Amino acid sequence: MSDVTISSAAQLHRVHMVGIGGAGMSGIARILLDRGVKVSGSDMKESRVVLALRAAGARIEVGHRAGNLMLSGGTPDAVVTSFAAIPEDNPELVAAREQGIPLLRRSDVLALLMVDRRAVLLAGTHGKTSTTSMTVVGLQSAGLDPSFAIGGQLNRAGTNAHHGTGDVFVAEADESDGSFLSYSPEVAVVTNIEADHLDFYGTEEAYHRVFSEFAGRVVPGGALVLCLEDPGAAALAEGAVDGSVELAGGVRVLGYGTPEALAAHPGVPVGAEILSFAADPEGGSRARVRFAGLPEAPVETVVVRTPGRHMLLNGTAAVLAGCLVGADPDGMTAGVADFDGVRRRFEYHGTAAGVEVYDDYAHHPTEVRAVITAAREKVAARAEATGRSGRVIAVFQPHLYSRTMRFAGEFAGALSLADAAVVLDIYGAREDPVEGVDSRIITGRMTVPVVYEPRFSDVPDRVAELAGPGDLVLTLGAGTVTMLADEILHRLSEPR
């Protein structure tokens, strides 16, 4: 192992990244390149992300080989990897250990890049990417140029990371492996806390506990912002106020939500109160929000273009977080209203034969429930405005055997909010198949018409048999199901 300690981003002149095409890794690569660092890397396949990084100056090879460490023309100062995704016997990691090259986690490098910046970190089981993205766009609209690193691609910017000229750094704080404990935010937002990633944490208690530790990472004089609509985040807020969760000196605790949620937690200072809510027939929603946690306690209209009350909560959190680091409330709300989404977050793919097709990354029961509810609200608002009714058809691919077995009943309940569903087989990702376990542990518990379709290539046919004019089709999941949205559109456009 190396005796070299990397304690500053200034020590990084050459960096090699294993799995460089991943969402988080590619963002770090972009920022390093913008800062003049020579970046090399490897990945298992070609992708649009890999091609874009090559165009920006990175030297990247497909496949993992020890010789890849020298792609930039010299020995790297550090090798960066995601330890959860890359096995320890990866030849590049083995070679780095043999040569005494420091091994860093992606989060370690991101923490180094945040030094001397005012860090705004967005955390939570659900909603991190959307809330982070809205915070970034709001800050840009307010005239700031923040650095940012997001787990998804901003539709407008066409990128997931940027090295900004301002003193604010906005990032998505991923809790899946505890790596968000590397950060020291000035402002930390927790959207919700609900058991997940139990393959890493083992117990729900351990999962909740890591968020308390994250709250303790907020720097003295900073702010901890929590959604009081969510029981997990509200419990953390209560603990932060009564002292059972240890915070640094002078950290403000601020809750946001509806009057009912705020009243249920009277000891938590109010950051933002959602006074009214209205759905938009064209999708999206708007609310009047009193930002009690800001000077003057302004009342602003917060508009989000993606449907669902959960997105309005995310937009409210984004405005509050941006204002806490100095942005103007009007600029923040204007940016959030202009925000046109992130890839795979209620992403519109097109309309064929009168059927709208959307794609979403939702892969936890709460996320599936929220997205289907948002789709139902959109269809209902359209019907009220135009008289054109329709149904919601969910196309779901479960992600991970462990998650599917743990939440089978919850998935069944969430999917049963749709009018009909097509369920694919489980996408195992990093997990091996479990004998005797398939998606029928979900479909067997559902209360709406459902088709279990294990043949990936036959899914568009099953959807075409179900969908009709006015319907909305949602492809849902964290695996390969995203590839089906356009295939479904193509199939719907063919003569029946």
Image (cartoon, grey):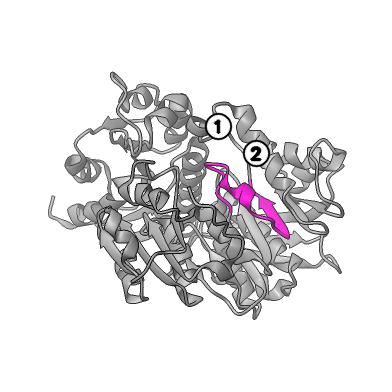
As drawn, 477 above or below 153: above
Specify the amino acid type for callout 1. Tyr
Q: Which mark is residue 223?
A: none
Amino acid bearing label 2: Val
Part of the protein shown in magenta: 173-191
Mark 2 or mark 1, which is nearer the start of the sequence?
Answer: 1
Q: Secondary structure at mark 1?
A: helix
Where in the figure is residue 123, as x and y percent of width and height?
61, 50
Q: Nearer the viewer, residue 381 or 23?
A: 23
> What residue do we see at 28% from left, 58% from top?
67
Picture disc at residue 201 = 1
Q: Is residue 6 left or right of residue 419?
A: right
Residue that numbered label 2 is attached to: 210
Q: Is residue 229 visible?
A: no
Cβ atoms under marks 1 and 2 closer than 8 Å:
yes
Q: For this rendering, which residue is in front, 377 or 86?
A: 86
Judge whether 469 appears above or below 33 on screen: above
- Secondary structure under badge 2? helix
Q: How many marks?
A: 2
Asked if residue 145 lies left or right of residue 488, the reply is right
Q: Position of residue 210 (x, y in %)?
A: 65, 38
Inspect this view and state whether residue 198 appears. Answer: yes
Q: Is residue 295 left or right of residue 466?
A: right
Tell me where residue 5 appears, x and y as whole percent: 57, 56
